[in-house]
Amino acid sequence: MNSVADVWSIVLQQLKKELSETTIAAFFDELEAVDIRGNTFILHCANDFKKGYIESLYLKNIKDSLHDIFSTDFEVKILDDLAFAEFNGGTVRKQSDRFTSDEFTFETFVVGPSNKLAYAASQAVAEHPAQNYNPLLIYGDSGLGKTHLIYAIANVIRRNDPRSKIAYVKGDDFTNELVDAIREGKTAEMREKYRQADLLLVDDIQFIAGKKQTQEEFFHTFNNLYESGRQIVLTSDRPPSEMTQLEDRLRTRFEWGLLVDVAPPDFETRLAIVKNKAALLGMELPDKISAYIAENVTANVRQLEGTINKILAYKDLLGNDADEETVTRAMQDILKRSNEYIPTPEAILEYISKYYSLEESVIRGQQRVRDAVQARQIAMYLIRSMTNLSLDDIGKVFDNRDHSTVLYSIQQVEKKMKKEPAFAETVKEIKTNINSKR
């Protein structure tokens, strides 16, 4: 058991209370806990863009979380590939290592009614790529096992043919790579990387929607692979029909093959996941404790696994047994975030401030610049729809505006959402990300 990895799991759970799920998924997915040396917590990030972004914006959040865990100050050091290779005796861990790992396989995936079809379809694609279901698109909320399934597909294909070329990318990283390739004059190299692949895996494909040049590039990549008989597997948080900013020509192609969804697991499946994860970590949980976790942690698989990791961290770092008190402590942050979560006006304003890169005082104030007006109106609309505040109370949040001004702003947002799908998608994205901070 790698205790530093468990500490990192706890840190991530705490960060989810401060940062949106989109931020965590987009920028923290490639961070790997490496070691603790004295009062220095060492991480590795292979993506230089994400490494720089985290160092400039979120290093303090990580330090604060570590302080909460250990009650002492920590420095945080993020290694790039070169520094990690030196640290690790010259060996750089590659993304493709996960395709041969025992962690993300069909054997370690717990099957239940909520994911049975997605599991069966993924197995069929793995054994007979590009024959029946091409593309395969797996959709559902975050943390339900979509990435596990596409890694499992890659695992089987790599095992059956070690020479197979497998390309994996997240939707937002595809955009970042394209921007860098255009700037550096290396678009030909990027195209070769993806269009020579025997298997293309794209996680969170919804992030390319609304990005014209990215969609253009992916359209031609898709066609090239499809016409040459290569398998394409995509994941997203919604079906193509609900990606309002996705071009029609891509939407129809995504629907050519098979669309399968994954839903939150039922109690029996959650219980099996708890027992499976505990066994993989070499920990025996009493049936009563396993059932208690499965009954109370209901949102997704990632939360279940995070709870087990946290229990193991308590056991290894603090010497606590896996009794009901320890389990309750491990679950307390998750239990606080119930389905009845109601964000505060301050939480809504804080997120919109970051989304539009505007000071909260500007959004609350009287400035009439375009971004400020739109951000202000969306804030009023979301506070009205997501909280119990009256129009008068909302007006007080915005420099004591009267209720008629608030009502006008809300109506403007509603009208624009009906007329402009792209704007409606923006409002939906903001609302989803605020909710994900529960």
Image (spheres, rainbow, N blue to C red):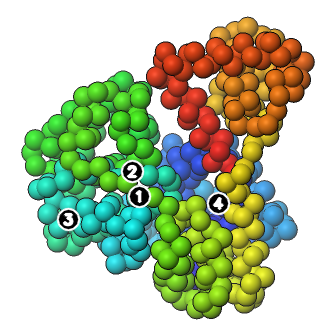
Q: Earlier in the sequence, mark 2 or mark 4?
A: 4
Q: What residue would you read off at disc 4?
A: 12
Q: Which residue is mark 3?
A: 124
Secondary structure state at the residue bearing disc 3: helix
Choose between 388 and 381: the one closer to the eye.
388
Q: Is residue 431 above or below residue 270?
A: above
State if disc 3 and disc 4 touch (CB < 8 Å).
no
Tag of residue 262: 1
Q: Earlier in the sequence, mark 1 or mark 2?
A: 2
The amino acid marked with disc number 4 is Leu
Position in image of residue 395 (x %, y %): 85, 21
Separation (CA) of disc 4 from disc 3: 34 Å
Q: Position of residue 325 (x, y in %)?
A: 78, 82
| Quadrant including the N terminus | bottom right
If you read the primary sequence from the N terminus, does the residue marked by circle 4 or circle 3 appear first? 4
Q: Amino acid at mark 3?
A: Ala
| Sequence-first disc among 1 and 4 | 4
Q: What is the distance, in whole Å, between disc 1 and disc 2 at their CAs?
A: 6 Å
Left or right, 430 with reference to 253: right
> Between tags 4 and 3, which lies in front?
3
Q: Is residue 244 above or below residue 329?
A: above
Q: Vertical placement of 106 versus 141: above or below?
A: below
Q: Are marks 1 and 4 in contact (CB under 8 Å)?
A: no
Q: CA distance from mark 1 to mark 4?
A: 23 Å
Residue 139 disc label: 2
Q: Is residue 46 left or right of residue 394?
A: left
Total tally of numbered discs in the picture: 4
